[in-house]
Amino acid sequence: MNSKRKIQLADFNRTVILTTANTLFLSRGIESTTMDEIAHEAGFSKTTLYTYFDNKKDILDHLILEVMARFYQELIPIANRQNSFREFYRELCHALMALHETSLAYFSAIAGKIACSEKITKNNKALKNIAMTGEQIHQIIAKRITDAAEKKEIGLNAPVADVMMLFWLCLTGLVEKSSYREECLLRHLEKDRKAFLDFAFDALLFMIEKGNISDCEKAD
C-alpha cells in the first residue's frame, strides 16, 4: 500500500471513529460511553482505536475542535458584514443559540475553552488547535467591540478584555442555563425560553451600549 493510500485510509478510519463516537456521546452521554462501545460500533478493534486516539478524552477533544472550527467559520461572515454592532450582536446571539441546539453535549466545554484558552505545553495537536481556534473567535468578537467603541455605538468605559469576558460569559451562560429552566420561566415569568433570552440579550446589550460596566466595577 503506497503512502497516499495509507493516509487516505487513516483519514477514513479517524472519520468513522469520530462519527461513531459523536453518535454515542449524543445518545448515551459522554460519561456513559466507553472505548469498548466506540470500537464495537465503529467496527474496529480496540487496538485499532488506540492507533488513532490516545483515549476517550482525545476523541472528545477532536469532536470539540470540529464544532469550534465550524462555529468559527460561521462567525467570520457575521463579523465581516458592514452592519451595526447591534445587528452583529443579534446575529451572534442567534448563532450561539443554534450552536447550543446542534451541539448540546459540547456547548459547555466549547464556551469555557473560548473564554479562557489555556497555553498547551504538551505535544497535542488537537488541544493546540482548540486553543488557537478559541483565540481566533475571541479576537473576532473583541475587534467588533473595539470598532463599535470607536464609532461611538457603545460606551467602552472598561478595558476591552473585561468587556469581552463579561460579554462572552453572560451570553453563553444565558443560552446554556436557560435551557434547564424552561418550565420555571413559564411558571414564574410567563415567558418561554426564547422570549426570556430576547429580554436578557437586550438587557446586556443596553448595559454595553451605555457603558455601564465600569459603574458595576465601582460598585463592587
Image (cartoon, rainbow, N blue to C red):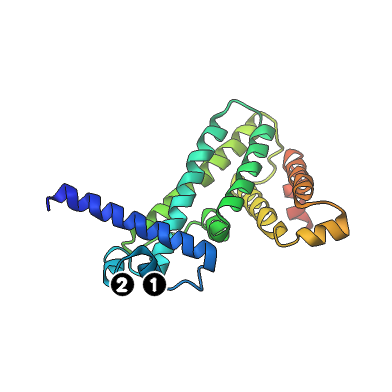
Q: Choose between 24 and 214: the one closer to the eye.
A: 24
Q: Which mark is residue 46?
A: 2
Placement of 83 over or under 44, stated as above or below? above
Residue furthest top in the image: 82
Give coordinates of residue 196: x percent, y percent: 79, 50
Q: Are marks 2 and 1 in contact (CB under 8 Å)?
A: yes
The answer to whether residue 110 is left or right of residue 96 is left
Q: Choose between 95 and 3: the one closer to the eye.
A: 3
Give coordinates of residue 190: x percent, y percent: 87, 53
The answer to whether residue 129 is left or right of residue 180 is left
Residue at the image point whose x is 87% and y is 55% from the top = 189
Q: Secondary structure at mark 2?
A: helix
Q: Amino acid at mark 1?
A: Met
- Quadrant (top left/top right/bottom left/bottom right) for the C terminus: bottom right
Q: Which mark is residue 35?
A: 1
Q: Secondary structure at mark 1?
A: helix
The answer to whether residue 38 is left or right of residue 99 is left
Q: Residues within 10 Å of mark 2 (few under 14, many from 20)?
A: some
Residue at the image point whose x is 34% and y is 61% from the top = 124
Q: Choose between 166 and 89: the one closer to the eye.
A: 89
Residue furthest left in the image: 2
> Is residue 7 in sight in this rendering?
yes
Residue at the image point whose x is 14% and y is 50% from the top = 3
Placement of 133 over or under 108, stated as above or below? above
Placement of 206 over or under 102, stated as above or below? above
Task: Measure the C-alpha gap from mark 2 to mark 1.
Answer: 7 Å
Residue 38, quarter of picture: bottom left
Q: Amino acid at mark 2?
A: Lys
> Is residue 136 in sight in this rendering?
no
